[in-house]
Image (spheres, grey):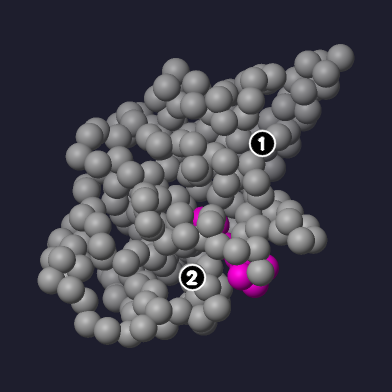
Amino acid sequence: MVKTNSEKGLEQLLAKIQEKYHNPKHKFITISSFSLLVDEIKNIIETHQIGLVITGTKGASGLEEVFMGSNTVRIIKSIKNCPVLAIPQHFKFKTPSEIAFATDFNRFYTTSELRPLLEMAKSFKAAIRIVHVQYEIKSLTEVQQFNLNMLRKYIGEVEHYVHTVSELNSVSQTLEVFANELDIHLLAMLNYQHSYMEKMTREPVIKRLAFHTQIPLLVIPELGMGTPPNNKNRKEISASN
């Protein structure tokens, strides 16, 4: 019965997508699974050479509220070889003309890690706003300046700007205010040890309460120098629960 309801729900969703958003360039395959969500996503990424995981996020409520839903956080923390795009529940699509890339410049960026960001910027002809959050405004170290220079070199001809902002109550609140003020349509960041992304998932609840982003979040894992998942014929997986 549960399996039947699951498959019926997927069929209804697929019919709705094909009717309302029909595009001959898109192909959809539904998978009904009773494995743990993260385990199944990992398996599908490997089996089908997935290049991007897309998930909706509802957030939570009350004292347990976090900056996004617990399933989304688990996906982001667990998926190490594929970018994750988290879409807020009430988000209405708007062609992104401004994309924010939050970073502290403490880490060297590889071309494989920046590829998802650059692909989206080029596809939508969007400008990239590189935003650096500092608790106390001070000059970049030599390492940070080198990493910034390499980042700008990789971004190349894509329109981009560098912003340094003072941290407010938390990194998450600071990025939300920045996104609102500059009308950012997509927030992107790398996920590695001591990164902004890690800090945001570890922030005390009292600080996270202020973060209610209404724009999609692109989280790029620490891919290193290796080759990213199949990019030539990239496929996308949309996760739901």
Q: Residue at x 30, y 40 (%)?
A: 223
Residue under numbered circle 1: 240
Residue toward you, 50 or 63:
63
Amino acid carrying mark 2 in the image: Val
Q: Is residue 200 magenta?
A: no
Q: Residue at x 18, y 73 (%)?
A: 141
Q: Is residue 157 visible?
A: no
Mark found first going from the N terminus, 1 or 2: 2
What is the spatial separation of the Cα atoms under label 1 and label 2, in whole angstroms?
A: 28 Å
Residue 109 in the image: x percent, y percent?
23, 53
Most extreme residue toward the right is 1
Numbered badge on residue 19 = none
From the image, give the main secondary structure of the stretch colored magenta.
Answer: loop
Q: Position of residue 237 (x, y in %)?
A: 53, 33
The amino acid type, in three-letter code, at marker 1 is Ser
Q: Is residue 64 left or right of residue 48?
A: right
Mark 1 or mark 2, which is nearer to you?
A: 2
Q: Is residue 24 left or right of residue 60?
A: left
Q: Residue at x 54, y 39 (%)?
A: 75
Residue 126, quarter of picture: bottom left
Which one is in front, 117 or 166?
Answer: 166
The residue singled out by tag 2 in the image is 171
- Which one is in front, 241 or 104? 104
Q: Residue furthest front?
A: 204
Examine the rendered structure and indicate whether residue 110 appears above or below residue 228: below
How many other residues sit within 10 Å of disc 2, few (<14), some (14-19) or many (≥20)? many
Question: What residue range appears in magenta?
Answer: 207-217
Tag 1 secondary structure:
loop
